[in-house]
Image (cartoon, rainbow, N blue to C red):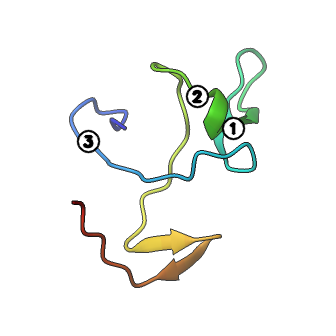
């Protein structure tokens, strides 16, 4: 994900499930938003993000460490 300044790059790890969704700006009237499921995301889709420290699980901050093999 790239921030609106087009310079800051963020990484995100999401479960590939219809029950996991992100908030996306809705085209048209003002500042409305809509949910977009991870399974329907396409390259170029715009989503809203809130930058916070630490990993989260169901909205709760957790301590984690990931080893990729």
Crowd around label 2: few <14 · some 14–19 · many ≥20 (10 Å):
few
Q: Are marks 2 and 3 in contact (CB under 8 Å)?
A: no
Compute the Cα span from label 2 to label 3: 18 Å
Crowd around label 3: few <14 · some 14–19 · many ≥20 (10 Å):
few
Q: Are marks 1 and 2 in contact (CB under 8 Å)?
A: yes
Compute the Cα span from label 3 to label 1: 21 Å
Residue holding disc 1: 37
Residue holding disc 3: 9
Q: Position of residue 4 (x, y in %)?
A: 37, 33
- In the foreground, 62 or 6: 62
Q: Position of residue 43 (x, y in %)?
A: 46, 20
Residue holding disc 2: 41
Left or right side of 53 for 61: right
33 to 28, vertically: above or below = below
Q: What residue appears at the point 69 percent right and 38 percent down from the top-left corner?
A: 37
Q: What residue appears at the point 26 percent right and 42 percent down from the top-left corner?
A: 9
- In the foreground, 23 or 15: 15
Which quarter shows the C terminus? bottom left
Which quarter shows the N terminus? top left
Q: Are marks 3 and 1 in contact (CB under 8 Å)?
A: no
Disc nearer the start of the sequence (3/1): 3
Crowd around label 1: few <14 · some 14–19 · many ≥20 (10 Å):
some
Q: Nearer the viewer, mark 3 or mark 1?
A: 1
16 to 60, vertically: above or below = above
Which SS class for mark 3?
A: loop
């Amino acid at each position: 994900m790239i921030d609106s300044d087009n310079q800051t790059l963020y990484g995100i790890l999401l479960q590939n499930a219809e029950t996991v969704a992100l908030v996306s700006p809705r085209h048209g009237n003002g500042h409305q938003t809509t949910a977009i499921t991870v399974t329907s995301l396409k390259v170029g889709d715009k989503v809203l993000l809130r930058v916070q420290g630490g990993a989260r699980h169901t909205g709760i901050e957790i301590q984690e460490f990931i080893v990729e093999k």
